[in-house]
């Protein structure tokens, strides 16, 4: 497209905007209810996710408090099971996913030079479904038959023993799914249709790429999950027997369907994190991302592989040997593209000129601790060994390493990295660094011992354990409370930054690259109303 | 200022690790080698992949740490601007691939061995229940249930206020295996040096039978049968747990495998057969009311108490009370039906397979007389036996509802 076309296009946009004559947010609370602005909606998602982080965290602390000592001191085992189940549901669907969607809302239009998301009203709707869905989900804890207690994986027949509040759980899951799919469609539509001329695919920042791929994973798998839970619903209330052998069904079929969703879901929780880290490390190394093309291909390979490894969650269900071998090999394969990504990050740091502001600390913490989780994942891929590891605390340690100092750290890194752009103020660097170090110490005290108790034979999802596991459980609980309460610092730092602080420049960071750093800080309510001119030489990533 | 924060943090990290390291039990850190050839091979695989991971970790983190030290702006380094190299990308794709292939071959070999069920010398069917195991020796007809030992069961109740370390001594610090929550009433006794085939299934929800020392873990799935095998080389006691979340008492259905020499095993089988014949004849005699209540109290503690609680008060909203309940003070036939067939779509499972005639009669008699229910009813094992045989007679009861039913149907 020629330059003239670009300006013409931009002029059209201007006229269009003038028709509406709407340049700032509506006043009052209704601004947040009726908003179609990508920045407002991004903010809503992020606050929602932060609140849910503390709700899910409180549940984790109930679990860890009960496990502080052997014996049952605090909660009934049934409520304990509700806590493990709800903790997972809240953290996955209420914290990590919405936070990534919030970041996508804020950053994708600004990164590709688009004025807003492609489907603004849908955007509003996909956020506002979530608080209601989670209200319903959490309300089951206060119903007569209690919250879901069969694990977040909802395996039948156990989950079908749940009382009538089960219907509310399924209903809430459906709405969360609708929200996710709508959000994903919006992201795909934005990336495909809202890029200004010159912003080719290979000029997009990694965060945009990882989200594009993540959105496809969501669109492909959430409907599968919706189907699975609908079958649970009809099995429970309408007399079907999809998952009951007595009626010709198969409980293991649920596990296959669930993990066909569940494994890509794992990558949904980590691919955007890869994108965030791929933005932050080059900035603070003052050196472009090493191997951009291979990063894109690696992300796509991981996404593809994520669809053909699901049964590695099921090695003990009695699969045929051929199936076990296939899923062992395909699972081991995932470590190749994942390794490429880690090596590329290290190569980006190599011979850079690094400074270690808080976002960089969290990003490096991510690379190291995510790799620890990735390596234990490689161990889990070895099927004969997995038969020993499966359903023990070793698995708990593994997925918490990839999700807490992995996904959650990427979210914290992203918050510190872009908060000056959002608020116009610098956060308190000293407090930010303290937050990083305290969190990092406690998160390891919390999760590292779980490797040991798991290998030594402690199953997961148990409220009480043999005395041999007592020491490490006590240490883990100390780590959990330390980590949990140190997150109050995070909240304090955010509030402090929103209310004031040193003014941020539009570039914010010395080594920052990309279109989001070309607009003022704080970012104006509407950005890129005129499409930016992207020349081949323009730095966009 | 900020490098101060870093320095303090690192110091704190080191200080924190020191006491933790001294305090912790280093004996219980790793996977057990176990007592079968397979478990040893699994252990070897585990250690091999572990060392590979450590090596990768040391290499990657080493380069990162060197880079973080050398390539910092504060040292006045100017950034390089290289940002791609097809050669290195190919290298770090191919090298891991080669490592993976080197790992995949031995792993596949062990897996193929684990899945070879041929030439087994005996078969044991293991059925998971909420929350106990049933063992059926298919070759000798011996069959029994195995569940958490009563003393452990009392100690693990909420508010039991038991000093666990004192009550269950032999613990973590000196490498002696502790047994809290790992002791059962009836252990699974098996002979050494025999290839034993296990057949796994479940009666209610999915369980998973796991004994780490045998490197055996297989899901027990209702309606399906999974295979598994072990050849134990060393006599001893090997403890395991249910590994698949199976409801409230998932953490409380341990497994104890006692491997003994062949002669000892044969003697044990003979004893067990004798005891079963004895128990069978017990089903046919008339029991006294007191006998039933006493036996019923034990059955209640083992099977009902964890949900319905020690005083039969239940947990409101979750587990109904038995004290003063309609079921336990109303029609005895409904009571029998509830215990034997369970309640659809609830956590109340069917006990008709799990309990013998005498146990069902005893626990129902107990429930109808304990907790202030005081119906005065006595239910004989023979009645349960005739019900199982297809009889539809109502049980004798002092409760008006039941009597009414009896008069209208003209029985008794």
Image (cartoon, coloured by chain):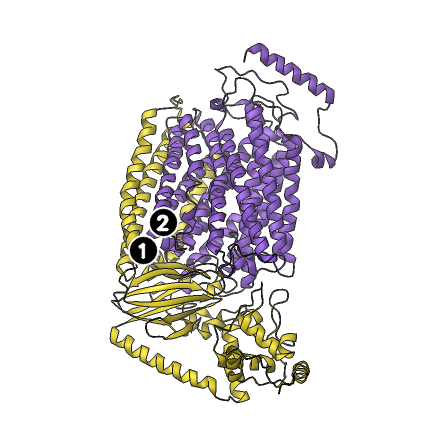
Q: Dividing the image into 4 quarters, which one contains the N terminus of chain A?
A: top right
Q: Chain of mark 2?
A: A
Confirm whether residue B40 shows in the render.
yes
Occupied quadrant, residue B255: bottom left
Q: Position of residue A326 (x, y in %)?
A: 36, 45
- Residue located at (31% from left, 80% from top): B270
Q: Chain of mark 1?
A: B
B63 sits to left or right of B333:
left
- Relative to A354, say whether A91 is above or below: below
B381 sits to left or right of A164:
left
Are labels 2 and 1 assigned to the same chain? no
| Image colour assigned to chain B | yellow
Front residue of A4/A78: it is A4
Disc ID at residue A503 = none
Q: Position of residue B262 (x, y in %)?
A: 25, 73
- Element under label 1? loop
- Relative to B44, say whether B141 is above or below: below
Instruction: Quote the CA–CA distance across marks 2 and 1.
Output: 10 Å
In the rendered picture of this protein, how many numbered marks are placed on residues?
A: 2
Q: Position of residue A348 (x, y in %)?
A: 40, 28
Q: Position of residue B294 (x, y in %)?
A: 52, 84
- Find the residue positioned furthest to the top: A4
- Element under label 2? helix
Q: Which chain is purple?
A: A
Q: Residues within 10 Å of mark 1 (few under 14, many from 20)?
A: some
Circle 2/circle 1 CB separation < 8 Å: yes
Residue at image mark 2: A324
A73 sits to left or right of A25:
left
- Residue located at (59% from left, 53% from top): A233
- Residue located at (65% from left, 44% from top): A131
Disc ID at residue B115 = 1
């Amino acid at each position: 497209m020629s330059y003239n076309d670009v300006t013409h296009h931009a002029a059209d946009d201007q006229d269009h905007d003038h028709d509406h004559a709407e340049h700032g947010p509506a006043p009052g609370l209704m601004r947040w209810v009726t908003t179609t602005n990508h920045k407002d909606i991004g903010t809503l998602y992020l606050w929602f996710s932060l609140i849910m982080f503390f709700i899910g965290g409180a549940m984790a602390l109930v679990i860890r408090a009960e496990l502080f000592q052997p014996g049952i001191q605090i909660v009934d085992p049934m409520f304990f099971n509700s806590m493990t189940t709800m903790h997972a549901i809240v953290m996955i669907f209420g914290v990590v996913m919405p936070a990534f969607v919030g970041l996508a809302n804020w950053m994708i239009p600004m990164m590709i030079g688009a004025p807003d998301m492609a489907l603004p009203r849908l955007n509003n709707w996909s956020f506002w479904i979530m608080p209601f869905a989670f209200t319903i989900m959490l309300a089951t804890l206060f119903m007569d038959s209690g919250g879901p207690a069969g694990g977040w994986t909802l395996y039948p027949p156990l989950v079908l023993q749940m009382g009538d509040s089960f219907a509310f759980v399924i209903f809430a899951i459906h709405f969360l799914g609708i929200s996710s799919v709508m959000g994903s469609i919006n992201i795909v539509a934005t990336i495909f249709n809202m890029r200004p001329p010159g912003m080719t695919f290979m000029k997009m920042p990694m965060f945009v790429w990882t989200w594009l791929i993540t959105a496809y994973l969501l669109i492909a798998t959430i409907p599968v999950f919706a189907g699975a839970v609908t079958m649970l619903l009809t099995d429970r209330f309408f007399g079907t027997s999809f998952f009951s052998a007595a009626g010709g069904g198969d409980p293991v079929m649920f596990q296959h369907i669930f993990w066909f969703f569940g494994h890509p879901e794992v990558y949904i929780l980590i691919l955007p994190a890869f994108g965030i880290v791929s933005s932050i490390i080059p900035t603070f190394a003052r050196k472009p991302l090493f191997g951009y093309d291979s990063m894109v291909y690696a992300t796509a390979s991981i996404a593809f592989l994520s669809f053909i490894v699901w049964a590695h969650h099921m090695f003990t269900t009695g699969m045929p040997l051929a199936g076990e071998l296939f899923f062992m090999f395909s699972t081991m394969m995932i470590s190749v593209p994942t390794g490429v990504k880690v090596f590329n990050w290290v190569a980006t740091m190599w011979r850079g000129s690094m400074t270690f502001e808080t976002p960089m600390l969290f990003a490096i913490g991510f690379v190291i601790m995510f790799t620890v989780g990735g390596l234990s994942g490689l161990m889990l891929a070895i099927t004969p060994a997995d038969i020993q590891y499966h359903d023990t605390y070793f698995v708990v340690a593994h997925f918490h390493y990839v999700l807490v100092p992995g996904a959650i750290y990427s979210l914290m890194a992203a918050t510190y990295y872009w908060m000056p752009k959002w608020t116009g103020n610098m956060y308190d660097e000293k407090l930010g660094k303290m937050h990083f170090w305290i969190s990092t110490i406690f998160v390891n005290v919390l999760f590292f011992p779980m490797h040991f108790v798991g290998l030594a034979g402690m199953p997961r999802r148990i409220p009480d354990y043999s005395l041999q596991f007592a020491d490490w459980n006590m240490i883990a609980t100390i780590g959990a409370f330390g980590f949990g309460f140190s997150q109050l610092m995070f909240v304090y730092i955010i509030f402090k930054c929103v209310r004031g602080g040193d003014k941020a420049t539009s570039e914010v960071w010395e080594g920052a690259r990309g279109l989001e750093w070309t607009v003022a800080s704080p970012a104006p309510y509407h950005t890129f109303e005129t499409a930016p001119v992207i020349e081949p030489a323009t730095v966009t990533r | 200022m900020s490098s101060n924060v870093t320095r303090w943090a690192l110091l704190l990290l080191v200080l924190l690790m020191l006491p933790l390291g001294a305090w912790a039990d280093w004996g219980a850190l790793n996977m057990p080698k176990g007592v079968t050839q397979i478990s040893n091979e699994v252990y070897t695989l585990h250690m091999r992949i572990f060392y590979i991971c450590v090596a990768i970790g040391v290499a990657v983190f080493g380069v990162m740490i060197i880079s973080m030290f050398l390539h910092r702006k504060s040292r006045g380094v100017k950034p390089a601007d290289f940002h791609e190299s097809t050669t290195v990308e190919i290298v770090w794709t191919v090298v891991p691939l080669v490592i993976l292939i080197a790992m995949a071959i031995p792993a596949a070999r062990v897996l193929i061995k684990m899945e070879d069920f041929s030439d087994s010398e005996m078969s044991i069917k293991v059925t998971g229940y909420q929350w106990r195991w049933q063992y059926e020796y298919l070759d000798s007809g011996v069959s029994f249930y195995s569940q958490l030992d009563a003393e452990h069961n009392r100690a693990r109740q909420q508010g039991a206020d038991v000093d666990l370390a004192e009550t269950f001594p032999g613990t973590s610090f000196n490498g002696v295996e502790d047994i809290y929550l790992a002791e059962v009433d009836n252990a699974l006794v098996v002979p050494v040096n025999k290839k034993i085939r296990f057949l796994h299934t479940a009666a209610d929800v999915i369980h998973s039978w796991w004994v780490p020392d045998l490197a055996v873990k297989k899901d027990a799935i209702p309606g399906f049968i999974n295979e598994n095998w072990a050849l134990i080389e060393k006599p001893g006691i090997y403890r395991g747990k249910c590994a698949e979340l199976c409801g409230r008492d998932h953490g409380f259905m341990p497994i104890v495998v006692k491997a003994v020499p062949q002669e000892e095993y044969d003697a044990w089988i003979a004893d067990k057969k004798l005891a079963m014949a004895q128990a069978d004849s017990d089903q046919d005699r008339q029991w006294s009311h007191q006998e039933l209540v006493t036996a019923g109290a034990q059955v209640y503690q083992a099977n009902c108490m964890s949900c319905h609680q020690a005083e039969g008060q239940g947990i409101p909203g979750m587990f109904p009370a038995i004290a003063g309940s309609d079921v336990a003070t109303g029609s005895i036939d409904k009571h029998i039906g509830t215990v034997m067939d369970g309640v659809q779509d609830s956590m109340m499972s069917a006990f008709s397979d799990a309990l013998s005639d005498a146990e069902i009669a005893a626990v129902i008699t107990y429930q109808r007389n304990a907790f202030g229910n005081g119906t005065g009813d006595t239910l004989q094992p023979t009645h349960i036996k005739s019900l199982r045989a297809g009889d539809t007679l109502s049980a004798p009861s002092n409760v008006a509802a039941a009597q009414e039913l009896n008069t209208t149907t003209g029985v008794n």
